[in-house]
Amino acid sequence: TRFPSGSIGFASAGDPRTAVCMQCDTKVMLTDIPPALQTALRVGAEVETVFAQREAGLYRDGLRLTDGRFVSLQDLQPGIHAYVPALLEREGAKDLTKTLETID
């Protein structure tokens, strides 16, 4: 979700204005990755990542790919979906999908 501040982050599927905080090293699955970004990142339409933070910088939150590369949340495009597999397992496969989208 793009928040009013202009930054991109994870938000609740039920209320896209509510930011969702994540612990570092949380497994996050990205789905519906657009073809151009798939090419740029050298990944498929769905990829397993882990939530990570840079040590410094204005936008520290991002995702670490399995090959170790860091992708800032600011580099993700609207329409990409993300979910935390452990939450789906614990909640009995409830729809907890988070969507990256612009709030009007």
Image (tube, rainbow, N blue to C red):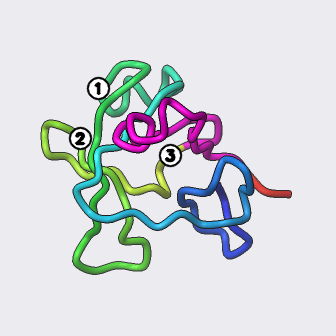
On the image, the x and y values in percent for residue 85 come to 37, 36
- Residue 91 in the image: above or below residue 52: above
Residue at left offset 42%, top offset 44%: 87
Residue 92 lies in the magenta-colored region: yes
- Secondary structure, mark 3, is loop
What crowding class fits label 3: few (fewer than 14 Cα within 10 Å), some (14-19), or many (20 or more)?
some
- Mark 3 highlights which residue? 76
- Residue 97 in the image: above or below residue 45: below
- Secondary structure, mark 1, is loop
The N terminus - image quarter: bottom right
Residue at left offset 24%, top offset 49%: 64
- Residue 60 in the image: above or below residue 101: below
- Mark 2 highlights which residue? 65
Dot 3 or dot 1: first in sequence order is: 1
Residue extent of the magenta highlight: 77-101
Q: Which of marks 2 and 1 is in front?
A: 2
- Mark 1 highlights which residue? 42
47 horizontally vs 5: left or right: left
Report the amino acid beneath label 3.
Answer: Leu
Q: Nearer the viewer, residue 66 or 98?
A: 98
Report the amino acid beneath label 2.
Answer: Leu
On the image, the x and y values in percent for residue 61 come to 38, 65
On the image, the x and y values in percent for residue 71 come to 33, 50
- Residue 69 in the image: above or below residue 2: above
- Secondary structure, mark 2, is strand
Residue 81 lies in the magenta-colored region: yes
Mark 3–mark 1 Cα distance, whole angstroms, equals 14 Å
Report the amino acid beneath label 1.
Answer: Arg
What crowding class fits label 1: few (fewer than 14 Cα within 10 Å), some (14-19), or many (20 or more)?
few
What crowding class fits label 2: few (fewer than 14 Cα within 10 Å), some (14-19), or many (20 or more)?
some
